[in-house]
Amino acid sequence: MNSGGPDGVAVAAPDVERRRVSMRVNGQVRTVAVEPRTTLLEALREGLELTGTKKGCDRGECGACTVHVEGRRVLSCMTLAVMQEGRQVTTIEGLERGGELHPVQTAFIERDGFQCGFCTPGQIMSGAAVIDEVKAGWPSAATADVRVPFTVADLSDAEIRERMSGNLCRCACYPNITDAVADAARGR
Amino acid sequence: MHPFTLTKTDDVTEAVQAHAADAHIAYIAGGTDLLGLIKDRVTQPGHLLDINGLPGMSRVEDLADGSLRIGALARMSDVAADAVVRERFPVIAEGLLFAASGQLRNMASIGGNIMQRTRCAYFRDDDAPPCNKRDPGSGCSALHGVNRNHAIFGWSEECVATHPSDVAVAFAALDANVIVRGRDGERSIPFTEFHRLPGDAPEHDNGLRRGDLIVAIEVPARAEGRASHYLKVRDRQSYEFALVSVAAAVTADGGRLRSARLAMGGVAHKPWRLIAAEAALPGVPVYDDEALRSAIATSFTDARPLAGNAFKVELAQRAVLRAIKTAGARA
């Protein structure tokens, strides 16, 4: 894949310095030439042609651009690509393992967690990370007492709604999204 | 975004010198507010200095005297999940968890959080209506405009904006200190003096000078820390800025308050301490709502609501009451 040249070039004005950035994207080292102002979202979509990650608001408000960097969910529209040198990036295209869908992906299909599908990659990337955060014992704003250790057994629907609130769905599939994340978290 | 250049630094002294020498340089850590400001053309720095590589600034340190030192580059989510923070200063963990979204909390640094600029819609509008904070001397669109979300304390004719940070309210209540490295070395700024009121220079949110870099927040050991709570009231239950918010930290003895530390968000250009109420509350039983209300009211005699936000005066006092009772139940 990485033959010395960049895998792609994201949008650039002709007179602006571009820089090569190498990241491990979905398990493979990928190099892309970007301007300092290029967001990770633009580098993924336009430089590496990974268009599963969506551009919604481009202001950090809708969650459609959610990806994982070093295993943590972040908003790729509010992240500069040049600041991700050497990092591990996972997008919706890389969530499956050896042809097997991630449990959150399976649950979204079974629970019909989408309608138009535009927010879905971000929802699924966020849902997968929520489960990891819960397993790590992270509390949320829906947690009655943050002083008490948090466990998977405490993951109520109110907890899921709070933890998923950074991902908007214009089709309002929220009840089914909540059910899908709950199923995946509880191993159903 | 406009074109800019970007370099990384792993040396605090170099970072401070570079920033002091060139007014076109902006520090970038999480970037969650800065990139939004650039996209909305509120600010157009020519060069970003990536400070994420500065060593030793991402830790939460539990010091021997019971105080906490939170590195400026620590991420909101990591501080909120920290066991010591949750046990000894729940108001800090809650202040962080009631802010932003899970994705943003993974990105945003503590130093950047308290440097956030106001969410006043006129300030953020890329059509650039009159705004003294964005364009000094141009006027304040909110003063006689849509000001439902704006200040009820400490505003001026020049600016009625509020400070958007949640955890800053907790830090103010706990008498934290902001540790800053600048051209003349390191200094400690009491949290309540870090942000400023708008006065006739609302373009300045705080007293920092060129070169200054926040390196840590220090939270002193306090008995009130354990019995503390952050309450946030907003138009929707999650992922929204505060209409009003309260950080309450108390000690109690036999059901009576011994001490109370109170600060509010969403009501002023800076986290707003309720000094008079803090003086009136000791001795008041935590179950006596009438007596609590009277004590709280002493901090609202100087409230000056705008045309669109008179509701905040009552809402704020009810929020303080609830926050004190929840904190009191932890004492």
Image (tube, coloured by chain):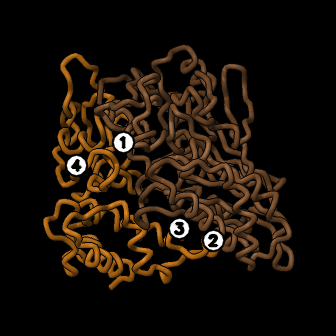
Chain colours: A orange, B brown
Q: Is residue A58 depicted above or below A111 in this figure?
A: above
Whether labels 3 and 1 belong to a single chain: the reply is yes
**SS of the residue under disc 3:** loop
Amino acid carrying mark 4 in the image: Lys
> For the residue carrying disc 3, how many other residues have a C-alpha within 10 Å: few (<14), some (14-19), or many (20+)?
many
Q: For the C terminus of chain A, which image quadrant?
A: bottom left
**SS of the residue under disc 1:** loop
The residue pinned by badge 1 equals A79
> Residue, x 51% and y 15% (percent of image)?
B22
Going from N to C along the chain, the mark reached first, 3 or 4, is 4
Q: Which chain carries label 3?
A: A
| Residue A85 visible from this viewpoint | no
The residue pinned by badge 2 equals B322
**Alpha carbon of mark 2 to alpha carbon of mark 3: how far?**
25 Å
Q: Mark 1 lies on which chain?
A: A
The residue pinned by badge 4 equals A55
**Alpha carbon of mark 3 to alpha carbon of mark 1: how far?**
23 Å
**Alpha carbon of mark 4 to alpha carbon of mark 2: how far?**
40 Å
**SS of the residue under disc 2:** helix
**SS of the residue under disc 4:** loop
Q: Which residue lies furthest to the left in this view?
A: A116
Q: Where is residue B126 in the image (x, y as percent from the top left)?
A: 30, 34
Amino acid carrying mark 3 in the image: Trp
Contact between marks 3 and 1 (CB within 8 A): the answer is no
Q: Position of residue A183 (x, y in %)?
A: 33, 82
Whether labels 4 and 2 belong to a single chain: the reply is no
Q: Which chain carries label 4?
A: A
Q: Mark 2 lies on which chain?
A: B
Numbered tag placed on residue B179 in the rendering: none
> For the residue carrying disc 1, how many other residues have a C-alpha within 10 Å: few (<14), some (14-19), or many (20+)?
many
> For the residue carrying disc 4, how many other residues have a C-alpha within 10 Å: few (<14), some (14-19), or many (20+)?
many
Q: In this view, does B292 lie to the left or right of A47?
A: right
